[in-house]
Image: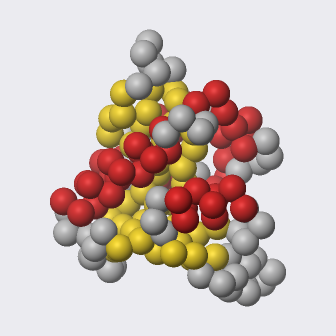
Amino acid sequence: MTIRQAQPADFERINAVIDEWWGWPVAHMVQRLFLDHFFATSLIAEEPGGALAGFVVGFHSPSVPDHAYIHFTGVAPEHRRAGLAHDLYNQFFAAARGAGCTTVRAITSPLNEVSIAFHRSVGFSVSEPIPDYDGPGLERVIFSREL
């Protein structure tokens, strides 16, 4: 497995598989702008031969310079539970630390038990559910991890 910096052209590859990988429509949450403007801080994992195996879309906050944010992470179903997500996160953490970040944050729905368990396993704290965080009726939990 190879992990490399994302490129804007990776948007099409992610968009082509993301709904299938999740099992429900989520492509609307990873818009092209993330790969056009934050490709330098996002990561792509590829199998030998180049097939997409996983990704992290994230960035270093321009407004809170000591924070990094992971917007979306995906691992192909056949590569889950093999450490790839941990590897992607560790590489993201190292780059964020190198850029002067001291904290990484992310969010999810409190119903996303798999994401909550994963983030706990890599050292994130998890907030209590925050009502209306992303608008009326859109409750979220916040993940936070010191680097």
Above or below 137: residue 35: above
**Left or right, residue 66 beside residue 75:** left
Can residue 17 be seen from the camera position used here? no
Q: What is the x, y in percent for residue 2?
A: 36, 27
Above or below 56: residue 54: above
Q: Nearer the viewer, residue 45 or 27?
A: 45
The tally of labels here is 0
Above or below 144: residue 70: above
Can residue 110 be seen from the camera position used here? yes
Q: What is the x, y in percent for residue 102?
A: 28, 73
Q: Nearer the viewer, residue 116 or 61?
A: 116
**Left or right, residue 6 beside residue 74:** left
Q: Residue at x 52, y 27 (%)?
A: 52
**Left or right, residue 65 beside residue 110:** left
Q: Residue at x 77, y 67 (%)?
A: 111
Q: Nearer the viewer, residue 111 or 6?
A: 111
Which quarter of the figure is the C terminus placed in? bottom left
Q: Residue at x 37, y 60 (%)?
A: 59
Above or below 53: residue 60: below
Colour mode of the rendering: secondary structure
Which quarter of the figure is the N terminus placed in? top left
Q: Residue at x 59, y 39 (%)?
A: 81
Q: What is the x, y in percent for residue 16?
A: 64, 32
Q: What is the x, y in percent for residue 130?
A: 68, 85
**Left or right, residue 31 beside residue 8:** right
Q: Seen from this angle, which residue lies furthest top?
A: 49
Q: Quadrant of residue 139?
A: bottom right
